[in-house]
Image (cartoon, rainbow, N blue to C red):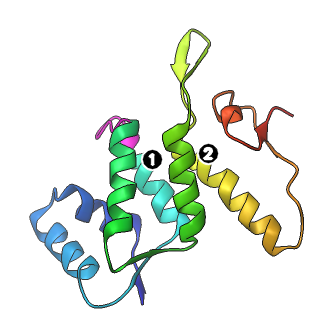
Amino acid sequence: MIAIDTNVLLRYLLNDDPKQSKKASAVIQGSQKVLITDVVLVETIWTLKGKKYNQDKEGIVQVISALFEEPTICFEDGQSVWRALVDFKNAKSIKTGGKQKIADFPDALIVNKANFASKNLGETLDCIYTFDVAAQELPGMMNP
């Protein structure tokens, strides 16, 4: 197994640098399993949603779904990532401060990773506190 950082994953997804994108594709489509950590996934999503690439919710869902289809790719905690993807897809837009806002994929991942970690610790997670009004729409998140 090998692991990749955010830059390698972005070059693979965006195919925007002929030299680096070719190398990234060779690594990801090679014979070894490729680990994408939660940090790399969240940084990638953050970058794709930023001003330069401006990916919307549908685009982010497509990117994460496509990563699940890559036979060599595995996630740090695939079940939590998958559940986060489902929660993110189902997240409803709310109006706050005069703007429409929706919970982000990282918000959904926080919920699912917290549930996973609490179970591994033999604990029951009561809730996750957040001041993010849109994130409070996700199951388990609430205002302190």
Q: Residue at x 41, y 70 (%)?
A: 5
Q: Amino acid at mark 1?
A: Trp
Q: Give SS at disc 1.
A: helix
Q: Residue at x 29, y 39 (%)?
A: 52
Q: Which residue is mark 1?
A: 46
Q: Is residue 78 left or right of residue 51?
A: right
Instruction: Say whether residue 124 is magenta.
Output: no
Q: Is residue 49 left or right of residue 27?
A: right
Q: Residue furthest left?
A: 18
- Residue 119, by quadrant, is bottom right
Vertical relation: 141 (above or below) 5: above
Vertical relation: 96 (above or below) 102: above
What is the x, y in percent for residue 141? 75, 40
Q: Is residue 65 left or right of residue 90?
A: left
Label ID, residue 107: 2
In this view, the residue in front, 89 or 106, is: 89
The magenta segment is: 49-56
Q: Residue at x 58, y 35 (%)?
A: 103
- Callout 2 crowding tier (Cα within 10 Å): few <14, some 14–19, many ≥20: many
In this view, the residue in front, 80 or 1, is: 80
